[in-house]
């Protein structure tokens, strides 16, 4: 069996999403998402009614934005997150738009072809917050290998 890497990341906007303060972030989403889709190892991303996931309410708090995607492996995702100029710029400026969160990212392995649900992603964030990095939910700095192939 082949495996791919799933990720969920969430962020809490400092002010309501519609506030002009967030315009700089929102204006970059189409470009960043297109860049992700062209990146080596990209497979899938969560998309709502627009070309992003901002309209998806995964949590009771409407200020929490959710992003999920699937990649070939940890290296492919890390390369995009940390080496793509557009994404790095968003990361550098994230404090302008988002509050600091203790658990905002979880990575886990899925069977190739599976598309993770928001419920799965939320469960992985919960596992990570309860037990720390494990084969069930991990981080870039504490990765776990994919399950052994059958």
Image (tube, helix red, strand yellow):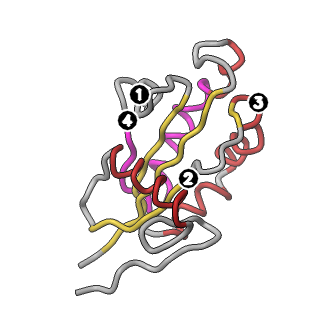
The residue depicted at 76 percent of the width and 37 percent of the height is 93
| Mark closer to the chain start, 4 or 1 | 4
Frontmost of labels 4 and 2 is 2
Q: Residue at x 51, y 57 (%)?
A: 106
Task: Answer with mark 4 or mark 2, whichever residue precedes in sequence.
Answer: 4
Q: Residue at x 55, y 74 (%)?
A: 143
Query: Which residue, given by chain and number where applicable, does mark 1 sit on?
Result: 57
Vertical position of residue 37 compared to residue 112: above or below: above
The mark closer to the camera, 3 or 4, is: 3
Please give left or right for residue 138 compared with residue 56 in the image: right
Viewer-nearest of discs 4 and 1:
1
Query: Which comes sooner in the sequence, label 3 or label 4?
Result: 4
Viewer-side residue, 96 vs 89: 96
Q: Identify the residue position indicated by label 2 in the image.
A: 105
Locate the N terminus by quadrant: bottom left
Name the N-terminal-most of marks 3 and 1: 1
Number of the label disc, if any, that sits on residue 96: 3
Q: Nearer the viewer, residue 85 or 64?
A: 64
Which callout, 3 or 1, points to the residue nearer the camera? 1
Q: Which residues are magenta?
A: 26-47
């Amino acid at each position: 069996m082949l495996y791919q890497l799933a990720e969920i990341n969430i962020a809490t906007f400092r002010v309501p999403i519609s506030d002009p303060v967030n315009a700089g972030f929102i204006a970059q989403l189409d470009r960043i998402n297109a860049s992700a889709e062209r990146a080596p190892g990209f497979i899938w991303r969560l998309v709502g009614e627009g070309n992003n996931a901002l309209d998806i309410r995964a949590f009771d708090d409407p200020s929490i934005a959710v992003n999920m995607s699937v990649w070939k492996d940890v290296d492919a995702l890390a390369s995009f997150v940390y080496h793509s100029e557009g994404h790095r710029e968003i990361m550098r400026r994230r404090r302008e738009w988002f509050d600091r969160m203790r658990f905002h990212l979880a990575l886990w392995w899925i069977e190739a072809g599976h598309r993770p649900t928001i419920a799965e992603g939320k469960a992985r964030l919960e596992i990570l917050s309860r037990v720390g990095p494990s084969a069930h939910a991990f981080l870039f700095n504490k990765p776990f290998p994919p399950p052994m192939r059958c």
